[in-house]
Image (tube, rainbow, N blue to C red):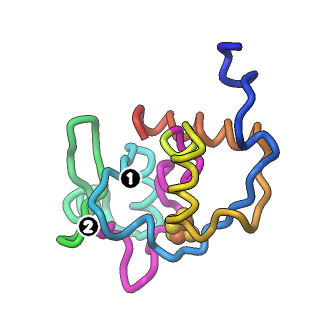
Amino acid sequence: MNDPCLRPYFFDAGIRFVCQQCGKCCTGDPGIIHVTVTDIQMISDYLNVSVPDIMTEFIRPYPKGLTIAETKNGNCRFYQTNDCIIYPVRPIQCRTYPFWLRTLRSESSWRNACRECPGIGSGTFYTRDEILAMVSLSLTSVADI
Ligand code: SF4
């Protein structure tokens, strides 16, 4: 039973989730929001701002790659006036939340995510396999989220 796709999980019956765009996961405590070169190109195209200008204004290096810059109070720089200005092209890390290894690795981690995110429990129904696929996708973005 070492294959992670064959193991039983607490979410085997599926989970409902829809992002309410409340911004709770984009604001407050500082964190890493990993971005890939593809993410940056998509953001550049969407905002019609050059890649060098996006890099200067919104992106910062960190030891494992590139992350979105934050304001002094820890808010994502793309979260402005209570709105994510890149929502349709947000990075993989944002698109796959809350289906991360870190949130799903235990029921207690998941309970913490449920307390923080009002979108969990309603909206689109995700099957176990869809959830595992989201976790896999999130891991293509960064190794330790
Ligand atoms: S906390 Fe949940 S509902 Fe709010 S913006 Fe983040 S993912 Fe969406």
Residue 145 at x, y percent in the picture: 43, 41
Residue at screen point 66% across, 23% down: 4
- Residue 95: x and y, percent? 55, 55
Q: Which residue is outermost to the front?
A: 108
- According to the picture, the residue beneath numbered tag 2 turns out to be 74
Classify residue 109 as left or right of residue 63: right
Q: Quadrant of the N terminus?
A: top right
Residue 44 lies in quadrant: bottom left
Tag count: 2
Looking at the picture, which amino acid does disc 1 mark? Ile
Which stretch appears magenta? 74-101
- Alpha-carbon neighbours of circle 1 within 10 Å: few (<14), some, or many (≥20)? many
Residue 109: percent from left, percent from top: 51, 47
Residue 97 lies, with reference to residue 36, above or below; the image says: below
Q: Residue at x 65, y 13 (%)?
A: 2
With respect to residue 114, does 5 lie above or below? above
Q: Residues within 10 Å of mark 2 (few under 14, many from 20)?
A: some
Q: Name the residue rendered at 65%, 63% in the picture.
A: 120
Q: Work out whether residue 55 or residue 131 is closer to the camera in this orientation and state it.
A: 131
- 1 left or right, relative to 67: right
How far across and how far down the image is residue 62, in percent? 21, 43
